[in-house]
Image: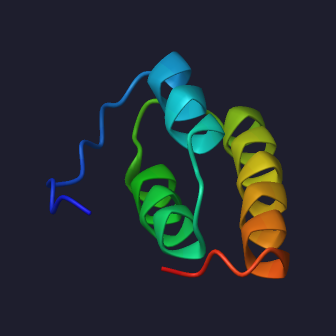
Amino acid sequence: MKNIPINPNLPLQRCWDMVNRIDTVAQANVAEAWLRANNIIDNEQFDDLMMALCYQRREAYHEGRIA
């Protein structure tokens, strides 16, 4: 995984793209850090993104896609 500095100004659509590409638990952890640092999305958008992220993380964990 690349070590890209967090962009706190990532637009909502790019946040959704990031969450929808999650394939491993490690990627979910990185995506969560990016969402928590975001200054653009509002609370409702954050909650929706985190719900989707948690689902992706849970599925990856159950399928053994950890790293």
Residue 64: where, in percent of width, then height? Answer: 72, 81
Task: Identify which residue is drawn at 30% across, 32% down.
Answer: 9
* Residue 41 visible: no
Image quadrant in which you'd find residue 17: top right
* Residue 51 visible: yes
Residue 35: where, in percent of width, then height? Answer: 50, 51
In the rendered structure, the answer to whether residue 22 lies left or right of residue 39 reads: right
Q: Nearer the viewer, residue 5 or 39?
A: 5
In the rendered structure, the answer to whether residue 15 lies left or right of residue 54 reads: left
Q: Quadrant of the N terminus?
A: bottom left
In the rendered structure, the answer to whether residue 7 lies left or right of residue 30 reads: left
Q: Nearer the viewer, residue 56 or 7?
A: 56
Task: Identify which residue is drawn at 83% across, 65% down.
Answer: 59
Whether residue 2 is situated above or below residue 7 in the rendered picture: below
Whether residue 61 is situated above or below residue 19 in the rendered picture: below
Task: Identify which residue is drawn at 35% across, 30% down.
Answer: 10
